[in-house]
Image (cartoon, helix red, strand yellow):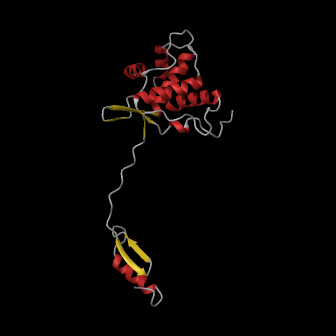
Amino acid sequence: MTPPTDDPLAPLRPLQLSLPALEQQLALLLDRLDPPSPDGRVNARPDARTLRWYQSRGLIDKPLHYDGRQAIYGYPHLIAVLAIKLLQSAGLRLDQVQERLAGAPFALLEGAVREALQRAGPAEVPGALLPAPPGLLPTPAPPTPPARALCAAELAPGVQLLIDPALVPDPDALIALLRAALPTGASS
């Protein structure tokens, strides 16, 4: 089967979610997948307590990081819980799910979830897999590198030259060389 050009998992990769937002995002995805519970004992939509229990059992990893006291979860957590629910919907007990997931490559779980989403069809909202749930936390911006002092020179009216002295060994010699190369009367 040729995979579609649109990856249904792509919008999920950058997500960073609080526990309530993770719970809501999972509910939206599971509503889309609609995995049946074979015996009615399995909660199809895991709540925060269930997610914490999964973590204590080693079924999902610890949070990515903490924002103050709030745990932040991400894409690997979504994939792991969706894989758990897909295996449970196939009739496996949680101990059997745990055995299957132990040492399973992440790419295998990701592929199973991708295939299930593709079978479920396109998302209801065109152009997006799911709306962003409340509590979605933005991905932290990368740290800004410290500012460096630059040498500035006006070569001609309206022509400014900036030189990074950390990269150019003799900025003054370069400025003099450039000014000499300009037509007469063009330099200031």
Quadrant housing the N terminus: top right
Q: Which of the 4 image quarters holds residue 187?
A: bottom left
Quadrant housing the C terminus: bottom left
Furthest toward the right, the residue is 1
Q: Vertically, is 118 above or below 36?
A: below
Q: Position of residue 53 (x, y in %)?
A: 39, 19
Q: Which of the 4 image quarters holds residue 136?
A: top left
Q: Position of residue 154 (x, y in %)?
A: 39, 79
Q: Position of residue 155 (x, y in %)?
A: 41, 81
Q: Vertically, is 42 above or below 75?
A: above
Q: Which of the 4 image quarters holds residue 159?
A: bottom left
Which residue is nearer to you in this view: 78 or 124? Answer: 124
Which residue is nearer to you in this view: 75 or 48? Answer: 48
**Is any atom of residue 104 visible in this view?**
no
Which residue is nearer to you in this view: 122 or 82? Answer: 122
- Which residue is at a point 59% across and 21% down the rendered structure image? 34
Q: Position of residue 169 (x, y in %)?
A: 34, 73
- Which residue is at a point 54% across and 19% down the rendered structure image? 87
